[in-house]
Amino acid sequence: MKNSLSKNSHRIKEVNKLKDCRVCGGTSLLTFLQLGPTPAPNGFLDKMQLNNSEKFYPLDVCFCESCGMVQLAHVVSPKVMFSNYVYIPSTSVTMQGHFNKLSIDAIKRTNAERGNLVVDIGSNDGTLLKFFKESEMQILGVDPAVNLADKANKEEIETICDLFTRDLAKRIRKEKGEAKIITATNVFAHAPDLHDFVEGVKALLSDDGLFIIEFPYLIDLLEKVEFDTIYQEHLSYIALTPLNKLLEKHGMYLIDAKRIPVHGGSIRVYVSKVNKASSQKFKSLIKLEKKKGILNRETYLKFRKRVDNIRHDLVQLLWSLRLKDKKIVGYGASAKGNVTLNYCRIGPETLDYIVDSISYKQGKFTPGMHIQIHPEKKLLEDQPDYTLILAWNFADEIINKQEEYRKKGGKFILMLPEVRIV
């Protein structure tokens, strides 16, 4: 390994080891998966940075045997993870359509009226808030990434550049009033202090409002072996059972939930300050979690074995193709892709390059493994024999987009829940 942990001992100041469960405070934590020391998954490098020492961080996952919360064993400082964030949902047609539907759903469920306040936590570049703005809601975003907050504000999506906390929530309420709708899409799992986060929502949300959370669902992660969705910014891997326990500690109530297809299988939950009757869907999902064994340690030990098998099969396939002089590239310079590349030790000796649609990633190199990123058009220009889809959560969109590449004989490699060629 070019950049070992011993060369980066100063990183310990940026990392805190988990001593007890983030939800229940229990100390019965089973470490069931170790994906190795990895760099920040969105820490793309310029060419001049390739000879510099990179910082690597532990990526160990544990299971609380008291409440069932799955969580990282080490917390990397949010300043490291989010100061300059490169994932932008507005670049995906899939996510734009998803957010449009979410805004319609939220307004309908709350009977929100023109001028009601909508707050999006982890608002990114404001893609979701734009749809609320079109419905004439008062909008406000909160996001710690300076680059994204600046982008949103320039596009007239008012955004506070900060981490969401209870103190910030109280300041927002004092200045803007209470929020009818609070959304947190793919960000709740990032919070280092879940209790403070929920207290902040409670302080800001109106009594007749809804807190709507979306996050990758633990059931999907386990069933589809989505190990590459595990990285340093995702501190928690959530199921409804432990989440419900967390919310109830703060007088918040999970009243409904539904599974959604984005990000390889997620769930949307609806939370109220009023103790309403839970929906039948929510009750059914709680039963499903019990059936799937999310509270049993054996479930997680079996998952580890499946992850090991995927790594073996993927590396074996790639090298068998290289031995046949086949040209292989990657598609999607994503955080999850960088986890796969580092865990499987896949570098430029295996993948000639990676293509990506986001312009400011192009010309850069992936963290850790240093594979160069090019524009998507290079795929048709070079017509490589095989393309490994690293951003598999957008696989359908990518395959449809690259129909000409397939017609000319190009083949795609998918790795989850099993390695296969399409």
Image (spheres, grey):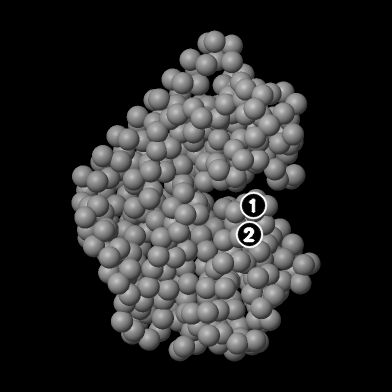
Callout 1 secondary element: loop
187 over 298 or under it: above or below? below
Kindly identify the residue that appears in the image at 36 percent across and 35 percent down.
307
Q: Are marks 2 and 1 in contact (CB under 8 Å)?
A: yes
Q: Where's residue 156, x and y in %?
A: 76, 72
**Front position in the image: 389 or 143:** 389
Left-right relation of 365 to 289: right
Callout 2 secondary element: helix
Query: Residue 92 shows which numbered tag?
Result: 1
> Quadrant location of residue 53?
top right
289 over 104 or under it: above or below? above
**Front position in the image: 116 or 43:** 116
Q: Where's residue 281, x and y in %?
A: 33, 68
Left-right relation of 128 to 48: left
Q: Amino acid type of disc 2?
A: Gln
How many numbered discs?
2
Kindly identify the residue that appears in the image at 42 percent across and 43 percent down.
226
Q: Name the residue under label 2.
A: 96
Q: Where's residue 47, x and y in %?
A: 73, 33
Left-right relation of 237 to 103: left
Crowding at mark 2 (Cα within 10 Å: few <14, some 14-19, many 20+)? some
Which residue extends farthest right?
154
Kindly identify the residue that appears in the image at 37 percent across and 79 percent down.
252
Kindly identify the residue that appears in the image at 63 percent across and 56 percent down.
89
Left-right relation of 148 to 419: right
Which residue extends farthest top?
324
Q: Amino acid type of disc 1?
A: Ser
**Front position in the image: 157 or 255:** 255
